[in-house]
Structure formats: C-alpha cells, structure tokens
Image (tube, helix red, strand yellow):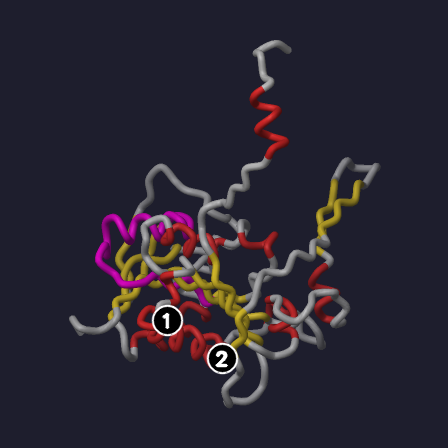
Amino acid sequence: MSDSLSILLTNDDGIDSTGFRALYEAFDGFADVTAVAPADDQSAVGRQLSRDVDVTEHEWGYAVHGTPADCTVVGLEALCPDVDMVVAGCNKGANLGAYVLGRSGTVSAAVEAAFFDVPAIAVSLYVPGDGDVPWSEKAEDVHDYRHATAAATYLAKNAPAAGVFEEAEYLNVNAPMVDGDGPVPLQVTTPSTMYEMTARHDGENGRITLHDGVWERMRESDFPDPDGTDRRAVVEGRVSVSPLTAPHTTKRHDALDSLVASYDGAD
C-alpha cells in the first residue's frame, strides 16, 4: 500500500472504544493506517502533554499510556513520522462550539498535528440525550458511527487534492446520529459562540457544581445558534465541517500600543 494515503489514527476515548474501531475499519479499507491512541479513556484532557509515556504494541499499531496530544507527538516524531494525515476520533459525543475546542482531547490531537504542518481531521458523533436510554449507553455498535465515518473518509480522500488544507490546518467534523443508511449532507460551519456554563455553590459542604446547560437546550432545540454554526447543523441532521487554524489569532490595536508605550516600570 505504498501509494495509498497514510493515516495516523488516534482519539481520546481509548484505543478499544467502539468509535475508534469504526474509524479504523473504515480507513483500513483504502489507507495505510497506524493506530497511535491512548491505552485508556482520556476524554476532555485538552492538549495536556506528558514528560514521558509507555507505549505497548497493539494489533492495529500502538497503545500509548498518555494523552491524545502525546499520541500525536509520539506518532509524528517517533512511530510513524511520514504519514500524510492525522485523524482523531471517532469521539462518542459531539465536540461543538468554540468553548469546547480547547477542552476536547479529540480536537487537541488534531491541533497538535497542525503544529507539525500535517493536515488533520477531528471526528465526533453527536449522541442525543433524549428518550429512555441515557446517551452514555447509546452508540455501542460500529454501525452507529456510519455517518461520521462516511464523512471522514470522504474528506480524507478528497480534501488534500482540493486544496482544503492550503487554507485550513484542520477540520472539526461532527456528525449526527440519525436513522437510515442514506447519505447525510455536509455543511461548512463555524463554531458556535453560545456559552451556558454555570457554577452553583452548596453552602453546607463547600462543594461547587459546574454545569453545561447547552446539552439540555440542544435536546429541546432551544438555542439561538443561527444557520451556519456547527451546533445548528448537527441538531438539524447535517454533518458539520468547521475549517480551523491552530495558532491563537492576534489583533494589534491602539489601546494596547498606547498602554505599552506609556510604561515606565513604576507600580
């Protein structure tokens, strides 16, 4: 398979998760895939890095006893340095909204690849929390990830030649979990800016509970995100594709220039 697309496949749910298997099987049909994924669940660790990690062989490649960002660095620097692309996922649970991007281990693996100048795709599945079955007990079969894997493989095959990665450094892809095997449309999106984090203090035991209210609002379709945002696309049954860049943006402006110019070192 020397002429085929070569993929470093990672995730944050762990190398033995159903979503990872779904992506591995989908890509293995046409690409040279090397798994470099966490040995266990590393969800929501962001771009946390380790000083050193243990690596064990796995039937698909390597299990790394570390974070998703560790996996990208270890893979691109030591285990499979000549791959064409990094694909991270498929995460069980959506990674939607600007505020989520820095928390997600799945997205962070793609961000880490961008600093190596390697194109990357982060792939997640939105699992609705409605009905009698908790969302955590859903998406337990590879077939449940079919719309996510279809979108991911299509983009991996076609995005480089189309020039997508000349403008974007990575793609954040979120697919809906919907019935039927027919195609689900793709939509180019921007990350939602809606933020619903709250913190409630319990005066009796000193505990403070943090809560993200977005998920309840998504279940009720009670959110203000307009068309063109990632959250709106997924809730309405489309695959969200957000083209993103990794470095933090900077915007120089007169207020800070004046403040810096007036500094004299005194308190």
Q: Residue at x 25, y 67 (%)?
A: 6
| Residue span colored magenta | 65-90
- CA separation, marks 2 and 1? 17 Å
The crowd level at tag 1 (other Cα within 10 Å; few <14, some 14-19, many 20+) is some
Near-viewer residue (128 or 167): 167
In this rendering, the answer to whether 243 lies above or below 49 is below
- Residue that numbered label 1 is attached to: 159
The kind of residue tagged 2 is: His
Instruction: Give the structural element (helix, strand or loop) at label 1.
Output: helix
Can you say which quadrant of the picture contains the N terminus?
A: bottom left
Q: Position of residue 230 (x, y in %)?
A: 59, 67
Near-viewer residue (37 or 242): 242
Q: Please check the rendered image and state whether residue 56 is part of the magenta-colored stretch, yes or no.
A: no
Q: Please check the rendered image and state whether residue 89 is part of the magenta-colored stretch, yes or no.
A: yes
Q: Residue at x 57, y 28 (%)?
A: 257
In the rendered image, which quarter is residue 2 located in?
A: bottom left
Near-viewer residue (191 or 266): 266
In this rendering, the answer to whether 14 lies above or below 46 is below
Q: Residue at x 48, y 75 (%)?
A: 148
Q: Position of residue 63 (x, y in %)?
A: 33, 56
The kind of residue tagged 1 is: Ala
Q: Position of residue 152 (x, y in %)?
A: 42, 73
- Residue that numbered label 2 is attached to: 147
